[in-house]
Image (cartoon, rainbow, N blue to C red):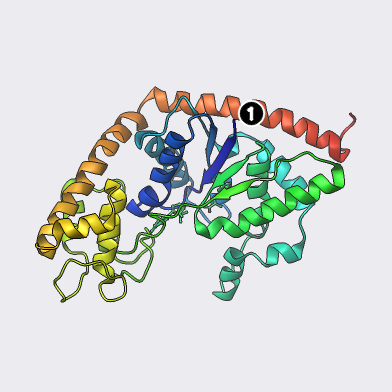
Amino acid sequence: MKRIVSGIKPTGSLTLGNYLGAIKQFVKLQEERENDEFYLFIADLHAITTRQIPHELRKRTLDIAAMYIASGLDKERTTMFIQSEIPQHVELGYILQSNVYMGELERMTQYKDKIVKGEDSITSSLFTYPALMAADILLYDADYVPVGEDQKQHLELSRDIAKRFNHYYSDFFTVPEPIIPSVGARIMDLQDPTKKMSKSADNPKGYITMFDEANIIKKKIKSAKTDSIGIINYDPIKQPGLANLLNIYASATDKKVEDIVSQYKDTDYKTFKEDLGQVLVDLLTPIQEKYQELIKSKLLQEILDQGRDRALDYAFKKMRKCKKKVGLGRK
Ligand code: AMP
Ligand code: TRP
């Protein structure tokens, strides 16, 4: 049995990109690996490395938990919890900060990008973020960590920190491996297909959120930018808007792009878009209905309570041993 651990940062509301690129992949991984154990947490401590409005942060934290369950995550096989409810993350994060060098943190592109953009209110926790992320993973002896391409570098650093700690104090942490999805990894903006679909886009017509109503979803797909070529064909260079819609269709239905192209090749954009709109409504409506039931329910609270208790149990034992190894405290 292997342990798979991942975290999601509760910033901004969830989009179709998050669903196809992360949530759906996670659910699929769980279906494929039926003997493995899954730990999934909402990384609220990571969220506050940039300014958050308190009531919005709390709402999004619960929204994400509910959306994952509504999307088909098996609640019996998932230890789902909220990061800040397990104090050992911060405790281990500090110990790991003492095992990572300034130079290594300065090389992290996510941090460097902010410096290059000239952002001035960069907090010290944003700088040390990778040490907390390493703690999130190493605390539970994760074997595998599913993440998007953008987190690969942070994971590499987590591996280096684990090896360094093991080398100095003798074997203690499992060195984790990343799992990076190959499909659905990049859903683009509906109005500007050169940009990743993101809730921070200026034009709300460019993204579909997990909460959009049926008529809004259909409208957004209908007004998605395509081209004047008018032929259904997969060509990301000449027809990037259409290629993105084909990718969305494929990812939503688990069909191959080429099969969708041959299905629609004798039709027009209007027909294809109408069908895609319906595919997405059929996909999202049942998830939204489950979400509505869950968000008000005791069940969600129970899942999070149970997740917290299980995670605490593991984290407490691991940290007690860790402190002993490092020479902290009396015994
Ligand atoms: P973020 O919302 O950027 O913190 O990302 C949360 C997760 O959703 C990460 O695993 C991302 O890789 C994934 N994700 C976000 N936007 C997209 C997108 N447009 N296409 C595919 N995956 C995405
Ligand atoms: N840093 C990740 C992100 O921005 C979220 C995250 C925090 C995470 N801790 C983690 C992901 C541990 C995997 C494992 O998306």
Write the residue at 80% across / 45% down: 166
Write the residue at 22% across / 69% down: 225
Q: Is residue 149 above or below residue 44?
A: below
The reply to whether the residue tagged 1 has its Cβ within 8 angstroms of ligand 2 is: no
Q: Is residue 71 left or right of residue 274?
A: right
Q: Identify the element where label 1 is drawn.
A: helix
Instruction: Give the amino acid type for the residue marked by disc 1 in the picture.
Output: Leu
- Residue 50 visible to an observer of this rendering: no
- Say which quadrant the C terminus sits in: top right
Q: Is residue 126 left or right of residue 80?
A: right
Q: Is residue 185 above or below residue 39?
A: below
Residue 190 point in image, percent of width and height: 27, 64
- Say which quadrant the N terminus sits in: top right
Write the residue at 42% across / 45% down: 25
Residue 161 point in image, percent of width and height: 74, 51
Q: Quadrant of residue 139?
A: top right
Residue identified by numbered label 1: 312
Residue 169 point in image, percent of width and height: 86, 43
